[in-house]
Amino acid sequence: MTTRILLAEDQGMLRSALASLLDVEPDLQVVAQVGRGDEIVPAAVEHRPDVALVDIDLPGGSGLDALPDLVAAVPGCTPIIVTTFARAGYLRRAMTSGARGFLVKDDPVDQLAAAIRRVLAGEVVVQPDLALEALRAPDNPLTEREQQVLLASRDGATVADIAGALYLSEQTVRNYLSAAIGKTGARNRAQAQAVAQDHGWV
């Protein structure tokens, strides 16, 4: 029986190479490829893959944010995160959102193929050291709104920019930023963003 795979990876060359390598496997077939987070669910609904290999950092929305909608829209599709960001916070978010595997892009493709088969056999596949780190990592102290405001504050966005993007008042944005700075132990919002991203909280 052939396992149908959806690839969500924004780097076109890497995506094509990965698809070619997986298609060499006799029991694996890449049936869809997307380069944006907001394309994951529509492609899964159209092609009905058995497995979705999803990167985290995608234009059009994070791969992590797409997981709950993917699982709800196509219950028969099993998500596996494949990323360069081996962070405990990302692992915890991925697992609570329905992922059954969390793999790093540095791993050889034969290990990826083996991981796909193991996940379909009912296992959860995560690097042991990362799993241990996730168990030791602190819980995310940020509310959903605080996470959204921190994400929107990237790339030098002003308070007015953030307020407009999230349909909030400027004072409300300042309050969320102040709370996020305090909870992360940072001195300013840039440092808060860095701390939150380093922990995988945003």
Image: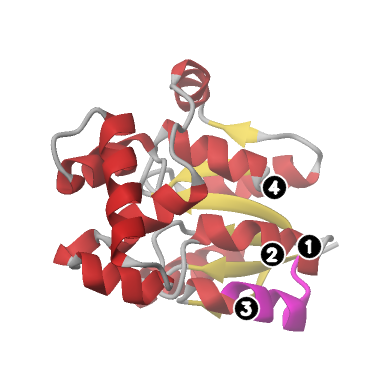
Q: Which residue is mark 1?
A: 72
Q: Which residues are magenta?
A: 40-49
Q: Which is more foreground, mark 1 or mark 3?
A: 1
The residue lying toward the viewer, choosing from 65 and 55, is 65
Residue at x-position 72% and y-position 46%: 117
Q: Position of residue 3 (x, y in %)?
A: 76, 62
In-image side of 79 versus 17 (left or right): right
Tell me: residue 174, above or below residue 29. above
Query: Secondary structure beneath disc 1?
Result: helix
Give the mark nearer the N terminus: 4 vs 2: 2
Kind of residue at disc 3: Ala
In contact (CB < 8 Å): disc 4 and disc 3: no
In contact (CB < 8 Å): disc 1 and disc 3: no
The residue lying toward the viewer, choosing from 55 and 115, is 55
Tell me: residue 84, above or below residue 44. above
Give the mark nearer the N terminus: 2 vs 3: 3
37 falls in the magenta region: no
Q: Which residue is mark 2?
A: 69
Q: Which residue is mark 4?
A: 98
Give the mark nearer the N terminus: 1 vs 4: 1
Kind of residue at disc 2: Asp
Q: Position of residue 12 (x, y in %)?
A: 37, 77
Q: Which residue is mark 3?
A: 32
